[in-house]
Image: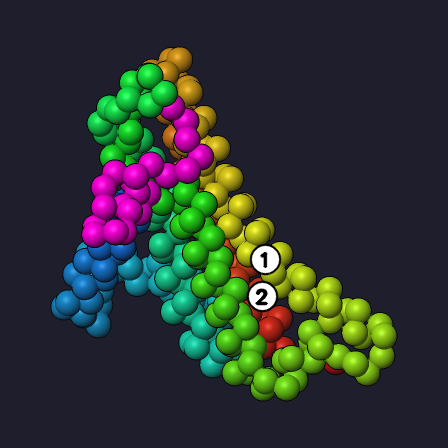
Amino acid sequence: MEISIAAEKIGHIGSLPITNSMLLSWIVFAGLSVASLVATKKMKMVPTGIQNFFEMIVESLYNLVADVLENEAQAKKYFPLLATIFLFVIANNWTGLIPGVGTIGFHEIKNGNQILVPLFRGGNADLNTTLALAIIAVIAVQVFGVAAIGTVKYAKKFINFSSPINFFLGILEMISEFSRLISFSFRLFGNIFAGEVLLMIIASLVPLVAPLPFYFLELFVGLIQALVFMMLTLVFIKGATTEAH
């Protein structure tokens, strides 16, 4: 098996190439959509079953967001995006650990050697996915900031001619906004991709028993990375929606 940083192409829809990470991300999206529909189909005042499970997750995330923002109105406004990011990231992280992901596929000849092209690959083990999430998060931060304090006041964070120091600080702030794209995307991609490579190597050396502790470790890492991505987005939103003095 060849370790590839780039996601492998497994087909096309017209001129659109379909990669194995894209396919698994679509499956995750479909699974979350179906689960949300099932959980809300027959809502009860006293929740049971899957409704109770999802309400527990939503309530825990909402309380966390509300505690950080210290504003109930803002928490209700920004929570849908933050919860969606968390659920999609953690689901992508954990589905990448399902047995068969990365090992079931088809063989093709590359450079004279026969290699296995996996049919599925963890969505967040593809830099394109994490970069797309980073772009969404960073753009959302800018939109929320403008909506909260106004276009002119928000723009003064980046373009301020009141003094040379403020102008220089504005340039640094602008660079900081762009650097978030890199930190967001590479942090998530690096942790998930490295974990999958580690599991692959351990499983090839000592199968069955040896990988189990690492599976539990990667489950924990997947949870932490989803929380980190959501919390960083939350902190950036709080900073963007607070007028600088």
User: Quick check: marks 1 and 2 in contact, CB under 8 Å?
Assistant: yes
Q: Is residue 69 visible?
A: no
Residue 164 visible in this rendered orientation of the protein: yes
Verify whether residue 105 appears in magenta.
no
Where the C terminus falls, by quadrant?
A: bottom right
Check disc 2: other Cα within 10 Å, few if <14, some if 14-19, many if 20+.
many
Percent x, y of residue 124: 40, 45
Is residue 5 covered in magenta?
yes
Residue 32 location, x and y as percent?
26, 56
Q: Amino acid at mark 1?
A: Arg
Residue at 54% over, 53% down: 184
Left-right relation of 232 to 131? right
- Left/right placement of residue 101 relative to residue 69 reads left
Q: Name above or below for residue 127 compared with residue 136.
A: above
State the colouring used for the structure image.
rainbow
Residue of label 2: 236
For residue 48, what is the image quadrant?
A: bottom left
Q: List the residue tagged with mark 1.
A: 180
- For the magenta stretch, what is the residue range? 1-22
